[in-house]
Image: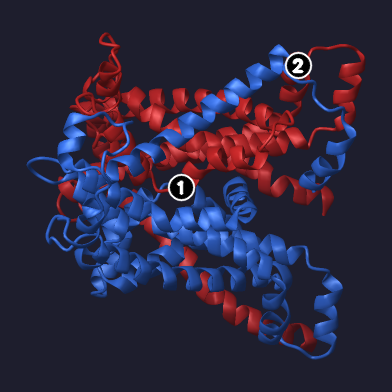
Amino acid sequence: MTMATAHERRPRGPKPRRLTAGRIGIYAFVAVSCLFFLMPLYVMVVTSFKTLDEIRMSQIFALPSHFSVEPWVTAWSSACTGASCDGLKVGFTNSVLITAPSVVLSILAGALLGYSLSLWRTKGSNVLFGLLLAGAFLPYQIFIYPLVRIYAYVSLYGTLFNIITVHVIFGLPVMTLLFRNYFSSVPIELFKAARVDGAGFWRIFTSIMLPLSTPMIIVAVILQVTGVWNDFLLGTVFAGQANWPMTVQLNNIVNTTEGTRAYNVDMAATILTAAVPLLVYFVSGRWFVRGIAAGAVKG
Amino acid sequence: MARRQKRSWGATLTIVPFWVLVLGAYVGTMVWTVLISLTSSKMLPNTQFVGLAQYTRLFATERWNIAVHNIAIFGVLMMILCLVIGFLLAAMVDSKIRAEDTVRTIILYPQAISFIVTGLVWQWMMNPTVGIEKAMHDFGWMGFSFDWLVTPDKAIYALVLAGVWQGSGLIMALMLAGLRGIDQEIWKAARVDGIPTWRVYVSIALPMMRPTIVTAVVLMSLSVIKAYDLVVALTSGGPGLSTDVPAKFIMDFFFNRSNIGLATAACTVMLIFVLVVFTPWFYFEYFREKNGSR
């Protein structure tokens, strides 16, 4: 809504006068801030193409004298991540295996619960929602240890199942909130008409509400893909060494190597880890902003 | 009545597993954590009740006090800087600049990446022997010094810098939405009265954006309390304990030092703090409107 009004008013205002001191000041500030935000990305990219010798000789802002893709190859396939030296590709596969089911399941669960809470209003649904939201505000540390004990008790600790279900549990509050608010805004007449026609709980969900909620599903996918992919804490605790996600492997490559640090490999590995969420960000554009706004403001 | 009963079946059957999940995974684990903190648990949880002894020990633990001190400095600096920078950026983007979308994309992209990535990049750039300090020396500015990361007194500022780099984009986005929500007539009226633009921002726009600022502060304080990934990637809490934070303290005592009792006591302190500080806000945000408008 605010975006629409912004566009409406734009042509009406007087064209800014050129080159007043204020405008120059604003553009100087724009330039400086853009440089500040872009600097780490630039340094990462430049460093990842240098040889180690060149890193020692030159400084971090210099362009590589000849581009070497070797750091990328090493980072992907042979860098040491603590126990093994198979590179980040292991972490990448793990992250995909963790992210894909976590995203699908948490969105399904959130949509279902949001639907139940907004349109069916069973007894105590406000209490359930309140508890869930409170859960979203508390640091994970408060829940982690008993969860470890529970998973260990049923011999599922440190498995793919473990980390996926944990992501679903901790993703539930925000997902539920998104869908609850969305379904609350659907005209109630639609719901009543379906009820009169004899559609039940599941039929209304699968045939009407789920197809209606495509925009919310897109926002939820963006939110969860970046959220789950970027997770570190839950991954270290619950995934188990064999399933460590990319973020954990990356931190191991960089922070636990002994001897000389291969900064070029480190930076290539860092870019590789950031690639998926960055891709989501640049492709989704405004949807991403909508996603973080919805997820952050209300979650 | 029969209709009512029929109505609730599918919904009831669906909601029951969610109740089990929430009561088990959220409420149950939370209560369990608090209960462990009242026992003498060390490596494994036991049931020997010791009252508040773990809390007495916790508050006497120097490392905990350092961690709390650090998070306070980090939190205050981070919030002030993010609010100021976020507001300036929003005002800038809002002042009809060219390439607005590109600028916004650049400011917001750090929001998409992991704290681990942020931490590692800044670790590399702030490394005095190979990073920005060396670059400045190579450019001929020999007196330049940027050694925050290796100086215990300054390491916390390194954490703030990286945090601001990642976090101010979101604050900008929130502030921008807030600015665009302000009635345009006010700007026109101010222009007619000949009030300078900066004055309108400070005296009119800023006070009108109070709800936005409150939201921003709540969001930031929640992420400050949870700060863990960034610390692990950037400094691992060092040098020494100079950037240790409560979240890291808890993780270390749970999983490396096997002192469950102390870790759960720290968790409980964190829990109480969050509840005391955020419950009023939480109540107003989510439940007040219901009584009024619905």
Chain B pictured colour:
red
For discs 2 and 1, the disc positioned in front in the rendered view: 2
Assign a secondary structure to mark 1.
loop
Q: Secondary structure at mark 2?
A: helix
In the image, is residue A41 above or below residue A62?
below
Which of B291 and A136 lies nearest the eye of the viewer? A136
- In the picture as drawn, the residue positioned furthest to the bottom comes out as A198
Chain of the residue on which disc 2 is drawn: B
Say above or below: A113 vs B162. Answer: below
- Residues at circles 2 and 1 in contact by the CB criterion of under 8 Å: no
* Location of residue A14 by image quarter: top right
Q: Residue at x 43, y 71 (%)?
A: A100
The residue to which callout 1 is attached is A138
Q: Residue at x 83, y 69 (%)?
A: A187
Q: Residue at x 17, y 43 (%)?
A: A262
Asked where in the image residue A176 lies, by quadrant, the reply is: bottom right
Residue lying furthest top: B143
* Amino acid identity at mark 1: Leu
**In the rendered image, what is the letter of the chain coloured blue?**
A
**Foreground pick, A78 / B279:** A78
| Dot 1 crowding, Cα within 10 Å, few <14, some 14–19, many 20+ | many
Left or right, A44 with reference to B94: left
Q: Amino acid at mark 2?
A: Ser
Label 2 to label 1: alpha-carbon separation: 35 Å
Q: Position of residue A250 (x, y in %)?
A: 26, 52
Q: Is residue A292 visible?
A: yes
